């Protein structure tokens, strides 16, 4: 039975998609059958794993709007045990279409539940907003992974993010837990990165993950080649960090479970 982890932050540019892609790919590399669902209308998890958004036969849009079985929209990647359910431009219109649908916040959950037995981990790359798509992700997920970039404006959004997560959790899925808060774009040479790390520790003392993701050029390059960092450059700092994160999350879940 798969553990479903939603990667969320209402702020863009925090390393959310980078984390979703690379965490899922690294868990797959560690021999756990893993599915990445691209639930962000930008479709960056789709292109970042080597799929062309323009030529998709099926996508997550068809699953939640047209009731296509999720198993029919899943694609194999070059990495063993790592699969992707892609997104295309149609997903941008799904927010409007969902408004008039029955069980509008449960559409993704129903689809995810249908494939839980086939995977050990399912990672959801969520949109950087708090609309109906994100509500669907909250309903479908077991836990939330929140990437926070080590930059000044990250601090401004922390309290708002906490309130939003708590209210959505109470309304949509009371069983939802925190997988953890992940510091991204970390540069140990700057005071700012260390300041942000201290501040995040105050807000989430029990949830901050030990692994931090550094700024890394190879990590930024990999999506342009349609590859997770583990296959693009497995010796890079970025690859080592995401592999460390995957191991930390697997260990935490084994301990809980």
Image: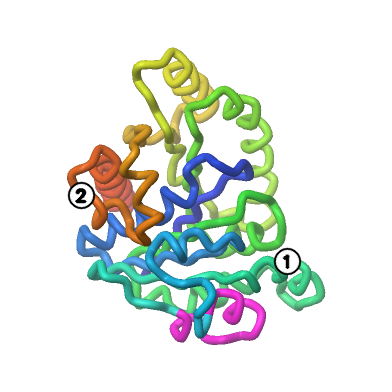
Circle 1 crowding by C-alpha within 10 Å: few under 14, some 14–19, many from 20: some
- Total count of labels: 2
Residue 248 lies, with reference to residue 27, above or below; the image says above
Relative placement, left or right, of 68 versus 180 is: right
Kindly give the residue lying farthest to the left in the view shown. 235
Q: Secondary structure at mark 2?
A: loop
Residue 134 image position (x, y, % from top left): 63, 57
Which residue is labeled 2 in the image?
A: 234
Circle 2 crowding by C-alpha within 10 Å: few under 14, some 14–19, many from 20: some
Which image quarter holds the C terminus?
Answer: bottom left
Residue that appears at 41% across and 16% down: 190
Which residue is labeled 1 in the image?
A: 95
Residue that appears at 42% across and 71% down: 51
Give the residues in magenta. Answer: 59-73
Q: Nearer the viewer's eye, disc 1 or disc 2?
A: 2
Q: Observer-nearest residue: 27 or 223?
A: 223
Q: Secondary structure at mark 1?
A: helix
Residue 227 image position (x, y, % from top left): 33, 59
Structural distance between the alpha carbons of marks 1 and 2: 37 Å
Magenta span includes 75: no
N-term-proximal mark, 1 vs 2? 1
Residue 99 image position (x, y, % from top left): 79, 70
Residue 105 lies, with reference to residue 76, above or below; the image says above
Tell me the quarter of the picture where residue 10 sits: top right
Magenta segment, prevailing SS (helix, strand or loop): helix
Residue that appears at 72% across and 70% down: 93
Residue 230 image position (x, y, % from top left): 25, 53
Magenta span includes 68: yes
Q: Observer-nearest residue: 53 or 106?
A: 53
Residue that appears at 65% across and 62% down: 133
Kindly give the residue lying farthest to the top in the view shown. 191
């Amino acid at each position: 039975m798969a553990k479903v982890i939603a990667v969320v932050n209402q702020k863009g540019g925090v390393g959310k998609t980078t984390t979703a892609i690379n965490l899922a790919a690294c868990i797959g590399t560690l021999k756990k059958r893993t599915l990445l669902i691209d639930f962000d209308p930008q479709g960056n998890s789709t292109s970042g794993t080597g799929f062309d958004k323009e030529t998709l036969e099926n996508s997550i849009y068809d699953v939640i709007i047209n009731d296509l079985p999720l198993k029919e929209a899943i694609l194999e990647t070059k990495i063993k045990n790592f699969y992707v359910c892609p997104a295309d431009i149609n997903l941008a219109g799904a927010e409007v279409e969902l408004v008039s649908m029955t069980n509008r916040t449960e559409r993704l959950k129903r689809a995810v539940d249908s494939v839980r037995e086939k995977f050990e981990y399912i990672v959801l790359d969520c949109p950087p907003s708090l609309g109906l798509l994100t509500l669907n992700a909250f309903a479908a997920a077991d836990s939330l992974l929140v990437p926070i970039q080590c930059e000044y404006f990250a601090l401004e959004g922390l309290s708002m993010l906490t309130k939003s997560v708590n209210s959505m959790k109470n309304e949509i899925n009371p069983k939802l837990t925190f997988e953890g808060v992940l510091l991204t774009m970390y540069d140990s040479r700057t005071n700012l990165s260390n300041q942000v790390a201290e501040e995040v520790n105050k807000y989430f003392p029990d949830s901050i993950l030990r692994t931090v993701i550094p700024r890394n050029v190879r990590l930024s390059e990999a999506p342009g080649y349609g590859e997770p960092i583990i296959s693009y450059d497995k010796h890079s700092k970025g690859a080592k960090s995401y592999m460390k994160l995957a191991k930390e999350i697997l260990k935490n879940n084994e301990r809980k479970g």
